[in-house]
């Protein structure tokens, strides 16, 4: 994707602030940067997020770590893929799956 015009830039910026986490059972969670101070929040695609995850995180990696611990320990599930923004997708071991250019 070319960043030659403002629309492309805005689209890329929105992708980087709205990241998806796919669980092995097919469900999806979101890690979003929505507030004006740059904090990250975890959202559930269906309903409310668990109270353990309802806080704000200073970085995407802190939010992902909290979500990973919750998914593994409390839900007894695992994460399949993480969309890290800008077309970068990793597996549960943080290994690159693909990169869309």
Image (cartoon, rainbow, N blue to C red):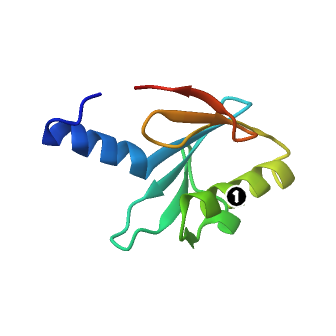
Counting every numbered tag in the picture gives 1
Report the side of 71 relative to 16 (left or right): right
Residue at 42% in and 38% down: 86
| Quadrant (top left, top right, bottom left, bottom right) of the N terminus | top left
* Rendered image quadrant of residue 36: bottom left
Report the side of 63 relative to 36 (left or right): right
The answer, for residue 99, to whether it is visible in the render is yes
Label 1 environment density (alpha carbons within 10 Å; few <14, some 14–19, many ≥20)? few
Give the camera-side residue of 30 and 85. 85
- Give the percent coordinates (x, y) of residue 51: 66, 67
* Rendered image quadrant of residue 74: bottom right
| Quadrant (top left, top right, bottom left, bottom right) of the C terminus | top left
- Give the percent coordinates (x, y) of residue 73: 86, 54
- Give the percent coordinates (x, y) of residue 62: 63, 63
- Give the percent coordinates (x, y) of residue 24: 74, 31
In this rendering, the answer to whether 74 lies above or below 57 is above
Report the side of 42 relative to 74 (left or right): left
Give the camera-side residue of 33 and 45. 33
In this rendering, the answer to whether 7 lies above or below 97 is below
In this rendering, the answer to whether 65 lies above or below 92 is below
Residue at the farthest left position: 5
């Amino acid at each position: 994707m070319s960043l030659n015009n403002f629309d492309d830039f805005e689209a890329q910026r929105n992708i980087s602030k709205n990241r998806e986490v796919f669980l092995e059972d097919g469900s999806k969670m979101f890690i979003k940067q929505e507030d004006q101070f740059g904090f990250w929040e975890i959202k559930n695609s269906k309903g409310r997020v668990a109270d353990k995850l309802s806080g704000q995180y200073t970085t995407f990696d802190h939010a992902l770590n909290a979500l990973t611990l919750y998914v593994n320990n409390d839900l007894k599930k695992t994460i399949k893929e993480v969309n890290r923004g800008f077309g970068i997708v990793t597996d549960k071991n943080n290994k690159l799956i693909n990169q869309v250019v």
